[in-house]
Image: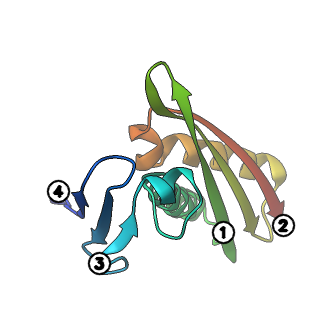
């Protein structure tokens, strides 16, 4: 398979506190979505890098889990994953220090042990997990 390229882009104007920007994704899912200091640190409406990383990680993990379950002959009815991204003050700046994956999976007919084995492999095998330099934790509920 050839290398796949996807993009997101951002525009920024002004200083860090009063400046503002927009985020646009190749798919058009976001187009000129506002972001800035106030949306990142003060809870104002708009997007921020952490929620975008969280969405990407949750989506990637869910797809990796579906793939790995399928390779073992299982098809989940549903996978619902939330990725909570922690941004902390570190030294003189900020860093994404942790991501907590919380997943609820509905999959009749799988043993708890087999599911535990597969979901832990999905956490490690997810391409987004592999690129992030953060402590990634996983909690999950299996409805079988």
Residue at figure coordinates x 49%, y 60% from the top left? 39
Seen from the viewer's position, the closer of residues 32 and 29 is 32
- Position of residue 130 relative to residue 68, above or below, is above
Farthest residue to the top: give it.
91
97 horizontally vs 47: left or right: right
The nearer-to-camera label among 3 and 1 is 3
CA distance for labels 2 and 1:
10 Å
The nearer-to-camera label among 2 and 3 is 3
Mark closer to the chain start, 1 or 4: 4
- Residue 36 on image: x %, y %: 40, 57
Which quadrant: the N terminus? bottom left
CA distance for labels 4 and 3:
18 Å
Residue 7 in which image quadrant: bottom left
Q: Disc 3, disc 1: CB below 8 Å?
A: no
State the residue position of label 4: 3
The numbered dot on residue 27 is 3
Q: Disc 2, disc 4: CB below 8 Å?
A: no
Mark closer to the chain start, 2 or 1: 1
- Position of residue 78 relative to residue 114, above or below, is below
Residue at figure coordinates x 63%, y 72% from the top left? 75
CA distance for labels 1 and 4:
27 Å
- Circle count: 4
- Residue 122 on image: x %, y %: 56, 48
Determine crowd level at label 3: few under 14, some 14-19, many 20+ residues with C-alpha closer than 10 A: few
Determine crowd level at label 2: few under 14, some 14-19, many 20+ residues with C-alpha closer than 10 A: some
State the residue position of label 2: 143
Mark closer to the chain start, 4 or 3: 4
């Amino acid at each position: 398979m050839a290398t796949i390229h996807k993009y997101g882009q951002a525009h920024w104007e002004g200083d860090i506190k009063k400046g503002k920007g927009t985020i646009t994704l190749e798919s058009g899912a976001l187009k000129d979505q506002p972001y800035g200091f106030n949306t990142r640190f003060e809870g104002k409406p708009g997007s921020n890098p952490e929620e975008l990383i969280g969405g990407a990680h949750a989506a990637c993990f869910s797809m990796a889990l579906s793939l790995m379950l399928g390779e073992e002959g299982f098809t989940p009815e549903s996978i619902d994953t939330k990725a909570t991204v922690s941004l902390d003050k570190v030294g003189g700046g900020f860093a994404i220090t942790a991501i907590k994956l919380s997943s609820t999976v509905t999959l009749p007919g799988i043993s708890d042990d087999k599911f535990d084995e597969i979901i832990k492999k999905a956490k490690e095998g997810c391409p987004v997990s592999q690129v992030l330099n953060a402590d990634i934790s996983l909690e999950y509920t299996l409805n079988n």
